[in-house]
Image (cartoon, coloured by chain):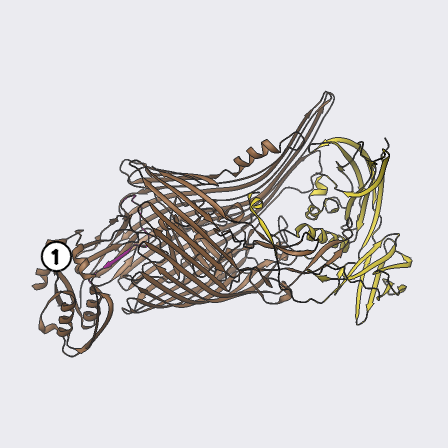
Chain colours: A brown, B yellow
Amino acid sequence: MFIRAVLFFCLFTGVFGLKLNAQSDFLSKRISLKIKKQTLPLILKQIEEKTGATFNYNQKIIPAGSFSLNVQDEELSVVLVILLQPHKLTYSLLYGNNFVITKTVTKTIKHTISGFVYDEETGEKLINANIYNLYSLRGTTTNQDGFYSLTLDEDSVKMVYSYIGYQSVSSTFLLNANFIYSVTLKSTINLPTFTVTSKPDNTNQFKPDEYRINANTLKKFPVLFGETDVIKSLQLLPGVSAGNDGTTGLNIRGGGPDQNLILLDDVPVYNPSHIYGFFSIFNSDVVKDVTLIKGGMSSRYGGRLSSVIDVRTIDGNTKKLNYQLSLGVLSTKLTLNGPISRNKKTTMVLSGRRSYLDVLNSLTQSSIFSNQFSPIYSNYYFYDVNGKVNHRFNAKHQLSLSFYRGLDNSFTKNSFKAKDPEKVIKEKDNQNLFWGNSIASLRYNHVISPKLFGWFLASYSKYTSGNESNYSYIEKNDTQSIENSYNYTFVSVIRDWNLMYNIEYKPLNWLSIKAGTGFVFHQFSREVSTSATNIVKPIPSSKEAINSIEYNAYSDVYIRFHRKVSATFGLLYAQYNLQGIQYAKSQPRFNLNYRPNKKLLVHASYSYSMQFLHLLTNSTAGLPIDLWLPSTMKIKPEFANITSAGISYSKGKYLYNFEAFNKNMGNLIEYKEQVNYIGKDNNWEDKVTSGRGWAYGLEALIEKRSGKTTGWLSYTYSWNYRQFDAINAGKIFPYKYDRRHNLAMVVNHQWSDKWDGTVTWVYTTGANTTLPVQVYYANSGVSPDNVIYVYGDRNAYKFPDYHRMDVCVNYKKQKPRYTRIWSFGAYNVYNRLNAFYVTPTYNQDGNRTLKLVSLFPILPNINYKINF
Amino acid sequence: MFLVLFSCRKQIDFQLPTQTQSLVVNSNLCADSFISFTLKYTQAINDNTKPLLENNAIIEIFTKDTLLLETIPMGSNGHYLSVNTKAQASLFYLVKISLPGKVYWMGDSVPSPSQSKILKTDSIIFQGKENFFRINYQLKDLQNGLDYYGIKMKHYCELYTLKPNGDKDTTLIEEWIDVETIDPILTEDQNNKFSKKHLLFSDKYFNGSPIIFNFGTGALANSISKKTKSIVIYMEHYTRQAYDYYSTLNEHIFYQNDPFSQPTLVKGNINGAYGSFTGKNVHNDSLIFKY
């Protein structure tokens, strides 16, 4: 009867969406207590004294005996759960500071509350938002589609919805049926949103191996040439080692850049870089969220060894049409984003970016170099276009169609025309190097039931690289015409057609299951097309295509065994077929979390991964001559065993995360010594060699997550080695980016609503390099004394230590109809000459010496963005 | 381009461990020439003294059947010249170099002469260059498996300078010049991009057939201060070992300062030593210019 009265009161005061912030605040009161062997009423009495709360209960339900309680700076809601739950007691907040303590009903009915969490201003779904019941501290987070599902006992509940940088919303109601309940959260301008970790408290979903950067955080990073870069921002995290200075190379826990599964809205991207690896293809204006998973990966992710970089783009503003123009030193971006149907159920995003190096360069060249006898014109440009159309049929069904197209083009044009009384001559010689990705996907999300969410994806991903050469010579006079021409095109293409279906099922609060299956059709083709007029055509046109099929099925089962212990058991089965060859392997994954108290998390993970595709590269600069190749009879799939363990601790505004990892990799491939490029050769398998690699190390992260000044300090202490029978005479050698120490410091400060600034500082041990250690002189046939270098052991020498500081200051001005943002900053503020490479050369005295070449001195930048 | 503009350089000192010096063999095994060798040693990258020469080696030249042809007992300035053994086309030579505590063996054959000739020459406009001197050249290839070739051009010219007293001073210059071409036969071989002065190619596209190709030079001079006197075209027929050596040597030089390439190793044919002992047969054609 009493409970019913309480429930009635709850319904009366705060049902369905009514915000009870005063009550929330009361439950959030922090207390410290150290009580030894006292009766429960006495303990409650002391809590009453500390907090001003009043507890009402029936003496009969209170257990006899003495109990202890030891809590330090804990919220009242947590203290009550710790105190009452072991005795099968629960509490409800009646009004003000009055609580009622009741017996937990043993065979209670359970209901599920599910829905989406949206941004109030744009209607965008929020990924990884926290949802929990304040009374029981049971919680969950939204998935990549902003969906959550939480099964709770039939009772009054107080649901709290929170997301970093947004005002929390709480709702109290009686949960007596399955509910679909979606909420919108309002962003807080005053609070900085500069963080890379999920909130470790209030949720069981905190993943220590996972870092998340949302759009707000991303836009505050200092930039190179005014381009905010998704991939480079990840280089500041523990366990991540950057490639060459200024590039987007990511070596995660000792893996190579090809071992990262880079997903753009769940579609794999094969080359994530523009301008020879100096910028990533991801346009920051349409990126909503980036997640880096470097260990304990879900079984959903297969096909790469080291990590997952999951880039999510915005779905489109559901409230109003939004225009955004961004002018940088290197490129211009224009983004349109908003509803395209009257009912605002259909939204679209269209964003384009183009570099203007070629425009500036052509102006320079035309004025300085161009003349009749030197008409050679070299240039470069890149562009990319992102598009998405999203339709919400209702709260349960959503369809989205998205595409990406990007291209880099480096070209040389040489044309000549001459006319005299006797003849006319026209000559053209054009060379062209190009590469780019094309991606399209169709995604259908549906909420099958409050406990079951499903999504289907059909996608196409294509990566093209190649070169083209066109020559023509025409000579005409009164009597005859001579025409010579030769055209040559080499194109290497990898295409993926992918179908997958996934479900997320949460039947119980302590159990959730993710499962799915997929099919990928890979096609690797290399095409040579030639044509010639009056010239011998040495290479016939040819087209070679290799097809392979990959099936996979996975399941991840999350079980919370106890309030303090949870685990995820995963299994991915992948089968790869190529021309009668089959590789099939079950890939187990395992995660264990032990949470002795709310602030401390001890975790361990193991995963076995297999990679069927290999990237053959002679550098980590993301050059377009890098080739993706399939596993064959001779070249077996790469595999890795990764184990990690660590401790996470949060206190107040700070998070501390310490981890140790060990990774063993097999069947890695590299060019054999003396081979730089495969090109159109068909015998590529003979030019590569297989070997193994291993890495281990310790990582630390200290993050300040809230306040006007936020940021983090990350440090990695690691070792990373390789061994190939056909390289370095079979001897073990350090990986190029075996950086013993890797330190990054990131500080963001918000002075006011208008001004904020970020400083980053990185310090790493220098990268390894192979140096010439001896010389001799050889006759090349045209020169008698050519200096020939004798190289030492592979990667036996280290560049000087690398360190760099970048700064960025943003000024935001809110006008009635638009917002404009000025960004000022500098890359490499104190002008450190960091090594890009070391080369032997001669000094002014004519003596041979080694010189360090650095690409980036201090580079100031300015960026202007206007948002309508 | 912008990266090059921004790049900065500074001298740097690496602590390099002491390396054992290795023997370097430069040799000449050319048809109708006396076989010769130069023996030196490698030196540390930061050692700017002259390389150490080896004059105390004993070099023995054998036939394919290990019949001793000649012994060269001592060198001068690291140079060893046979006095009796002229290399002959289609013969294989085996060489033993003996040093205190070390012996090096090497061997290669001398290829047959290439049958080639100039068909015609003319002056055209090529890639914007007026008075480009074009050579129409024929090579008759032998049908005996893959053959390897190289083309080089040497330019002889006179430079005229005025002395203070008004007299004209003439200097004869000889220089290797670029072999300029867009001929697919000469440009499609992966190895010939590494040196324009030494175009390497194989007969894989015309094995056993006569082939005509075009190449030329824009380096001819006919001015008051400089006049071309002649051009000599060298058509060299190589063994596979020689082709590998020259192509990797050119590649090594080409990539020496390229940060994006792997260190390229020069493919020699002497175990335990650098350099090579490889055979070639040279055919040359001269073009004399008269004004």
Where does the N terminus of chain B fall, quadrant-wise?
top right
Name the secondary structure under disc 1: helix
> Is A133 covered by the magenta stretch?
yes
Q: Mark 1 falls within which chain?
A: A
Residue with the mark numbered 1: A10
Residue farthest to the front, as pictured: B165
Q: Determine whether, in the image, residue A358 is placed left or right of residue A222.
A: right
- Between A277 and A131, the one lying in front of the other is A277
- Between B101 and A65, the one lying in front of the other is B101
Q: Determine whether, in the image, residue A597 is placed left or right of residue A35.
A: right
- Between A62 and A831, the one lying in front of the other is A831
- Between A576 and A754, the one lying in front of the other is A754
Could you tell me what secondary structure mostly forms the magenta stretch? loop
Report if residue A401 is visible in the image: yes
Question: Where in the figure is residue A864, as x and y percent of width and height?
Answer: 40, 40
Report the span colored magenta.
A120-135
Structural crowding at the residue carrying mark 1, measured as other residues with C-alpha within 10 Å and reported as few (<14), some (14–19) or many (≥20): many
Name the kind of residue labelled 1 in the image: Cys
> Is A668 covered by the magenta stretch?
no
Report if residue A174 is visible in the image: no
Seen in the picture, residue B256 relative to B196 is either above or below; the reply is below
Where does the C terminus of chain B fall, quadrant-wise?
top right
